Amino acid sequence: MKKLSLTFLVFLAVMACKTNPFTGKSTLNFYDNSQMFPMAFSQYDQFLEENKVVKGTSEAQMITRVGQRIASAAERWLDANGYPGYLKDYQWEYNLVEDETVNAWCMPGGKIVFYTGILPIAQNETGIAVVMGHEVAHALADHGAQRMSASTIQQIGAVAGNVAIKDDQTRGLFNQAYGVGSQIGVMLPFSRNHETEADKIGLQIMAIAGYNPDEAAKLWQRMKAESGGQAPPEFLSTHPSNDTRINNLTQWAPAAKQEARKFGVTSFK
């Protein structure tokens, strides 16, 4: 049984390889768009029904305007780099929801929500573009499907261990060690890598959309100030630390501007 489970895990890993067009790297993903998108769209619609969506205000219009510019920039980049039609199944939608939470998110297939609580920290359209670029990047890179794939393998590993270990005490120790080890050693770094990847991709496409990538580090400085320094150690978090993100975004901004120039963008909002 143990050998069979290991063989199955290897099979999944081999069959699940999909190339991230922005990094050129193979990713762990055995859920295709036809599986992910309908489920995400349904959940998104349900969320909107259960929450207060802000319509018709200047802020709501700005969210849509920025989202459309970011999505268009992503499509331009994909078309220019040999991925025409990559976004054909995406159904972009941008909604502002009344909620004090300082957050925004994007579901697979391009369904995006901004909470009103993040608007004071974003401050302006360019700040919104920083957040929007990051969230759109999650959708472009199939991070949702990758997280589900990794979680599935984590669960299979747990089941395999419980089947293979016959002694109750040893099984209990295994479950404790496996739970902590797989979370801290695998799942949390996996999540932080996605956040870093989304930061880098988002910076690039916001620049192609005409927004100044130098503003990204400034936004995260404001996010750091808002948090008051209250955050878990980076190795226990799903996200990189504020300082890590600020340093990364500062270093990446010149390259993002250079990439934007390839598309004729020489000045930034």
Image: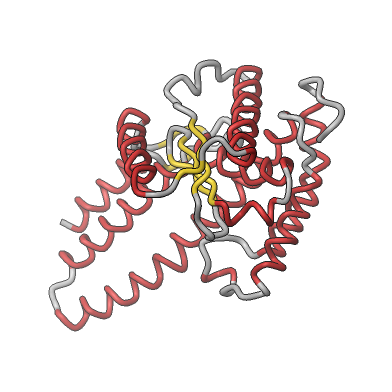
Q: Residue furthest bottom?
A: 169
Closer to the camera in the image, 60 or 227: 60
Closer to the camera in the image, 38 or 65: 65
* Image quadrant where one finds the N terminus: bottom left
Query: Picture coordinates of residue 241 (x, y %)?
Result: 64, 65
Rendered position, 69 above or below 57: above
Q: Is residue 216 left or right of residue 186?
A: right
Q: Is residue 124 left or right of residue 176?
A: right
Q: Residue at x 44, y 32 (%)?
A: 109
Closer to the camera in the image, 52 or 166: 52
User: What number of labels is visible?
Assistant: 0
Q: Is residue 33 left or right of residue 121?
A: left
> Residue 209's image quarter?
top right
> Residue 64's image quarter?
top right
Query: Picture coordinates of residue 22 (x, y %)?
Result: 61, 33
Closer to the camera in the image, 250 or 12: 250
Q: Residue furthest right?
A: 267
Whether residue 261 is visible, yes or no, is: yes
Query: Picture coordinates of residue 164 (x, y %)?
Result: 17, 66
Q: Residue at x 27, y 52 (%)?
A: 6
Q: Residue at x 40, y 70 (%)?
A: 181
Rendered position, 224 above or below 229: above
The colour mode here is: secondary structure
Q: Residue at x 83, y 41 (%)?
A: 254
Whether residue 15 is visible, yes or no, is: no
Query: Picture coordinates of residue 104 (x, y %)?
Result: 54, 50
Q: Is residue 239 left or right of residue 210?
A: left
* Image quadrant where one finds the C terminus: top right
